[in-house]
Amino acid sequence: MIYTVTLNPALDYVLSVPEAGDEPACRADAAALLPGGKGVNVSLMLRRLEVPSVPTGLCAGVTGRCLLDRLTEAGLEPDFVLLNPDAAPDAGTRINVKLREARPGGVPALREINTAGAPVTAEALEALAARLARRLQPDDLLVLAGSIPPGLGSGAYVQLLSRLSAGAAGRVRVVADTAGAGMAALLPLRPWLIKPNRAELSALSGIQADSDSAVLRAARNLQAAGAGHVLVTLGADGMLLVPARRAGADGLGEDCLRIGAVPGRALSSAGAGDASLAGFLAALRRGWKAENALRFAAACGAAAVFSPGGMGSRAEAERLYALTALAGPAVRRLPAP
């Protein structure tokens, strides 16, 4: 099973507005309240790909209950720790605002207003760890994704994993998609795979990852600090996979693989990295080779970018995958640094 952990989930209030210009007020053409947060997004995309997953984490208050309802409506079975279930919205799960403004040519501009989230206690993290310890089995995938809420320090994910170190729960494969000090703290615990973007890779490694060779050196730098496989999302430049030097048994091989971006009309980059990670994990669950897994990850990311509603569909991801296999960007092998 794949478990996704989102310590700081959100409800995303998405507003679509006409081109406002200098007007001080305007009326939205459409509005939607959607479940959000990086781990949540991964589970939502896995659901669209018909790969089972369980979204877990911490949520709070009436907004937290709304988040759980929306996940259930999406066909998932969330297993969050719900804190202070009757707390008002300003003390519950955060609400982020996504403003999509129409632009000439039909490509909307997206402005995101993200909040920090309500404070969380160490006791809440303990409750989540206990819940995960009861569920996790050997060879499960545990995806730790997104920001750390106020009240928990940068070592929150480390603290969570330390509670799972005994028994079956200690033998899960950890996938990490967080940034900054939170990711740096995780590296000594040897996560099976990490997924930084270019900026995160540069900040973590101390190497300006502005070329393929620099990305490879930066990834090796993080592997020397404890990371396993490194899957780097490069936005409009595609993706790059740097397998761990100890690779082999899990089917990812030893070759560093590179794929360019899938060509198409970009509408929104929101959630593209999460969709790419979901696609990569889904392909591995299906037993695909690393080259095809990377190609499918790129297709899922592109499906999100080309979708006005974000994330994209399984049908679109599979269509783009088939197209790239025929005439899209090639998967290239790069010389290992």
Image (cartoon, rainbow, N blue to C red):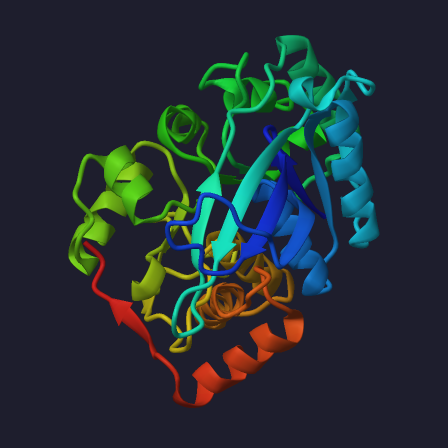
Q: Quadrant of the C terminus?
A: bottom left
How many numbered tags mark residues here? 0
Residue under the point 42% across and 52% down: 247
Depicted 205 relative to depicted 317: above or below:
above
Residue 130 x/y as whole percent = 74, 20
Q: Position of residue 192 (x, y in %)?
A: 48, 42
Identify which residue is drawn at 72% across, 48% down.
1
Work out whether residue 36 or residue 26 is closer to the camera in this orientation and state it: 26
**Relative to 293, residue 1 above or below:** above
Residue nearest the observer in this picture, 80 or 224: 80
Q: Nearer the viewer, residue 117 or 43?
A: 117
Question: Is residue 199 visible to the viewer in this orientation of the structure?
Answer: yes
Left or right, residue 251 beside residue 78: left
71 vs 163, nearest the viewer: 71
- Asked which quadrant contains residue 51, the reply is bottom right
Q: Quadrant of residue 106?
A: bottom left
Q: Could you tell whether 331 is left or right of 208 in the image?
A: right
| 264 w.r.t. 53: above or below | below
Which residue is drawn at the image coordinates 54% and 22% (left, top)? 149
Whole-percent x, y for residue 317 in the image: 57, 73
Q: Tell me if I can see residue 256 in this picture.
A: no
Tell whether 334 sits left or right of 197: left
- Residue projecting furthest to the bottom: 326
At x 24%, y 41%, the residue is: 202
> Residue 304: x percent and y percent?
53, 64
